[in-house]
Image (tube, helix red, strand yellow):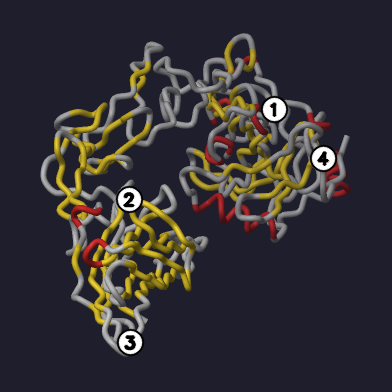
Amino acid sequence: MLRKARTSFSLGPWSWVLVSSLLGCASGEDADRSFANGENGGKDGSSDSSEQADADTETSFPSDFGMPCQSDEDCSSGLCVEGADGTVCSAFCSDSCPKDYDCLSYEGLQGPHDHVCIPQISRLCRPCKSDTDCQRHGVVQDASRCILQGDFGSFCGVSCSGTCPDSYACDEVKLASGVSVFQCVPEGGRSCECRPSWAALGLETTCTNTNSYGVCTGSRTCDENGLTPCSAPTPSAEVCDGTDNDCDGHVDNGTCSDNLDCTEDVCDGKGQCSNPIQSSSCLIDGECKNSGDLNPTNSCQSCKPSSSQTAWTVLTGSCDDGDVCTVQDTCVEGVCVGQVQQDSHEPNDDLNSCTSFNAVSDCDSYPKGSLEATLYGAGDEDWFTYTVSDNAFCLIYPRVSLTVPTGSNFDLCAYYTCKNGGTLSLKCTHGTLSTGYGMSGCCSNNPGDAAENVRLTPTCSGGGFDDSGTVYVRVFNAEPTFTCAPYTLQYGDD
């Protein structure tokens, strides 16, 4: 029976997609254009169902039409053409042929013939790899196409404009170029099957096996049992076994990763992994280091692959101990040691090593002098001393003030002793009365980095009206932390 053309189709679980000819055949492209213009079938490219039916009843064909043949001489028409299971006798046509035949331009052994009846089924459903595999022998500009049927493989269609053999439908398919053409394909989403006569032809198509791990490619052919199973392996997670398990084109890739940038991930292809350290790197305590990288906790240790790739290499020479208060930092037995940057008044850490100031008169203006110094290191304190002379018509009020560096907490004490061993009676105009080191004095211990200030009112007995004496100044750190930022000390008599 005749079948009407359809403009769109659904083939159930798979869809027909055209495979472009690997050979880039110009005749195939011309055929596509011819088909798109309706130039397929007879002289005017039409294969109208009613005309076909009329031709079947009105046109007479030789009695050996469709019979097997070996050569043109075996046929009364002189035309032995390709059929589905070998060659068969055919005939010339004007514009129509019997059912399941197309009236097409043909070039045989005896030269070109304008129109010859060619079986539609000659190569229909053959496994294929390119359009050339589907183009019937001798047909000029055959528009039959190799059509992809998903993972199943690719199989030949045949150009149509209305009718197809039984169990086939003339459906619209789209070329890779985006142009739509009509091809006879298995009806209702049915898969193609091999004909017994195809077993010896070496027909082959490329098939795939797809899952979440990847896509593996194989092939299938026609043999005496029909279409062979797809030879593609099933994709699986990549493992170290010398096989491309996920079919991504890389063998054993990613199978031996230790997630470290400084190692090579090596698989021996037999299930054994190794992770050698790269030549320019170190792997120390589980962390990657580049050549020349310093130990973040010790600048006298470095990554030196030529010495060791798994342990720090001890350095010599200059270093940085990370302490801005030290100078001349040097590596000593793998440890960075810096020299404390002391102020010019050191050593003056106790009463016996006081730094002396110029003598002060009670008639002098305050301050008599000032200096900058540092308290650096646990337990460091600074001692200073100066004498104050009691002159007629002036009053003696020794005074010391301290400006503390930001973020520190320094305290200040000033002690007084009378000249010539006189007995001291002391009051504190500023500061708190205090005793220490066998002396009496005034101390200021404001919180944090607030300024400290002491002012003494000494009275010495046993020496007449002379209250001259010596001031001993102590500057010390009230906190366990220390800095090398300088403080400022002013001294004199107020």
Asked if marks 1 and 3 touch (Cβ < 8 Å), the reply is no
- How far apart in space, not on screen, are marks 2 and 4 (Cα)? 107 Å
Query: Residue 202, percent across and down?
Result: 50, 21
The mark that comes first in sequence, 3 or 4, is 4
Name the mark on residue 394. 3
Query: Residue 123, percent across and down?
Result: 63, 31
Name the mark on residue 10. 4
- In the picture, residue 133 is in which quadrant? top right
**Quick one: 157 or 19, which is closer to the camera?**
19
Residue at image location 52% in from the left, 21% down from the top: 201
Which quadrant is the N terminus positioned in?
top right
Q: What amino acid type is highlighted by mark number 3? A: Cys
Q: What amino acid type is highlighted by mark number 4? A: Ser
The mark that comes first in sequence, 2 or 4, is 4
- How far apart in space, not on screen, are marks 4 and 1 (Cα)? 33 Å
The residue that disc 2 covers is 437
Query: Residue 341, percent across and down?
Result: 21, 57
Name the mark on residue 66. 1
In the image, residue 426 above or below residue 66: below
Q: Give the side of residue 474 with respect to residue 109, left or right.
A: left
Asked if marks 3 and 2 touch (Cβ < 8 Å), the reply is no
- How far apart in space, not on screen, are marks 3 and 2 (Cα)? 29 Å
- In the picture, residue 395 is in which quadrant? bottom left
Asked if marks 1 and 2 touch (Cβ < 8 Å), the reply is no
